């Protein structure tokens, strides 16, 4: 796959601020009496893949629409690469930085794939060989080159989603905003979409993506923001969230006496915080606070005690479990 697409160079009023692709201050959006977004202060570094999660109505789509300049804020400011967005002015040089794929993106299904992309490339002012080259590049990036002459109505849902993504990056933006891009996709289509995301991340494009499929975000994202009732209640690197909030579990299975396994595990050390038995499976599940070396020591001790093991599996709590944990903390 040829990946020669180069994101547009960010324009910054302050070169020292280029490290931040997006910054918001006190960002608030009200619709009549309903406040969809409340006082959001957000910082997203250039090149990050930032996942937005939260329940329906939390404000994810509103935030993305504000960043896409599809809505104007009631209060607050947005900065791209250090330059303030003015919603009452054209600022075409900033709009050129944005690629936006809404949940209900338009597809002109009577066109073929090439003509659809050619139409949007012309709207963005691409001409001649530059336009042709950009269409070839985005088709390669989303793995639709073999469908260039296909009528859009004949494409699968996953292919249509990737075509929408190709349209969003035809003008080589530096910031890509994706609102529920994997909604309704089957597992194969989601896997293909994740690969496209990896391709775009490797090009240095800053990606903001909202999704209810948290397993996909856990695999793709460098950073996570959690919205609740319009408020940004958490924003941190994914690795930091795991270290701070994700508990480690070890599942141990035996073909022997489950009581013997429990006894040996309880004798190990203070790293064993909780123990749950699963008699039908011959397993115990422990909450473990130790490091990998201590986990290896536990396994060695069980083997030396001649416990007939068939499973010893270490795992951390998932992003979904972290999300529910933060929600519980906020409600208490």
Image: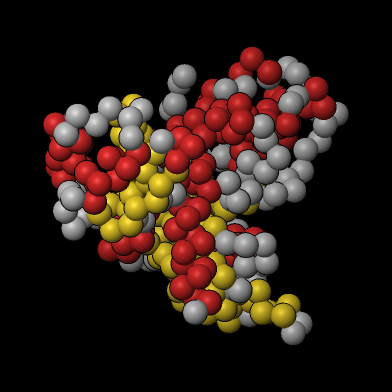
Q: Decide: is 166 above or below 12.
A: above
Residue farthest toward the bottom in the current orientation of the protein:
33
* Colour scheme of the rendered structure: secondary structure
- Is 229 on the left or on the right of 262, as rendered? right
Q: Residue at x 67, y 43 (%)?
A: 183
Nearest the viewer among 23 and 263 is: 263
Q: Quadrant of residue 122?
A: top right
- Is residue 78 visible to the viewer in this orientation of the structure? no
Q: Quadrant of residue 129?
A: top right
- Is residue 17 visible to the viewer in this orientation of the structure? yes
Q: Residue at x 53, y 77 (%)?
A: 331
Nearest the viewer among 179 and 313 is: 313
Give x and y (percent) for residue 37. Answer: 60, 74
Residue farthest toward the right in the current orientation of the protein:
110
Nearest the viewer among 282 and 120 is: 282
Nearest the viewer among 123 and 109 is: 109
- Is 302 on the left or on the right of 222, as rendered? left
Q: Residue at x 64, y 15 (%)?
A: 146
Q: Decide: is 249 above or below 39.
A: above
Q: Decide: is 45 above or below 4.
A: below
Residue farthest toward the top in the current orientation of the protein:
146
Give x and y (percent) for residue 66. Answer: 61, 65
Give x and y (percent) for residue 317. Answer: 40, 51
């Amino acid at each position: 796959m040829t990946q020669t697409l180069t994101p547009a160079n960010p324009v910054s009023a302050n070169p020292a601020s280029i490290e931040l692709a997006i910054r918001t201050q006190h960002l608030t959006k009200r619709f009549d009496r309903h406040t969809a977004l409340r006082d959001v202060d957000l910082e997203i570094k250039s090149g990050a893949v930032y996942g937005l999660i939260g329940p329906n109505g939390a404000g994810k789509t509103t935030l993305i629409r504000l960043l896409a300049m599809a809505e104007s804020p009631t209060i607050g400011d947005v900065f791209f690469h250090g330059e303030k967005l003015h919603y009452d002015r054209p600022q075409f040089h900033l709009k050129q930085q944005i690629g936006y794929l809404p949940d209900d993106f338009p597809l002109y299904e009577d066109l073929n794939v090439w003509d659809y992309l050619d139409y949007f490339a012309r709207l963005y002012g691409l001409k001649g060989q530059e336009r042709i080259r950009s269409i070839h590049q985005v088709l390669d990036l989303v793995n639709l080159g073999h469908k260039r002459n296909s009528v859009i109505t004949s494409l699968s849902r996953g292919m249509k989603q990737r075509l929408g993504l190709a349209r969003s990056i035809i003008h080589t933006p530096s910031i890509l905003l994706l609102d529920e891009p994997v909604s309704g996709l089957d597992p194969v289509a989601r896997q293909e979409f994740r690969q496209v995301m990896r391709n775009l991340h490797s090009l240095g494009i800053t990606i903001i993506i909202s999704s209810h499929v948290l397993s996909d975000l856990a695999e793709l994202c460098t950073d996570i923001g959690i919205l609740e009732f319009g408020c940004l209640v958490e924003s941190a690197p994914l690795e930091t969230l795991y270290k701070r909030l994700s508990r480690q579990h070890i599942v141990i299975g035996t073909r022997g006496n489950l009581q013997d396994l429990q006894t040996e595990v309880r004798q190990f050390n203070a790293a064993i915080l909780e123990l749950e038995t699963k008699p039908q499976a011959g397993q115990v599940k422990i909450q473990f606070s130790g490091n990998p070396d201590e986990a290896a020591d536990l396994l060695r001790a069980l083997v030396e005690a001649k416990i007939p093991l068939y499973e010893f599996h270490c795992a951390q709590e998932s992003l979904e479990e972290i999300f529910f944990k933060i929600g519980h903390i906020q409600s208490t």
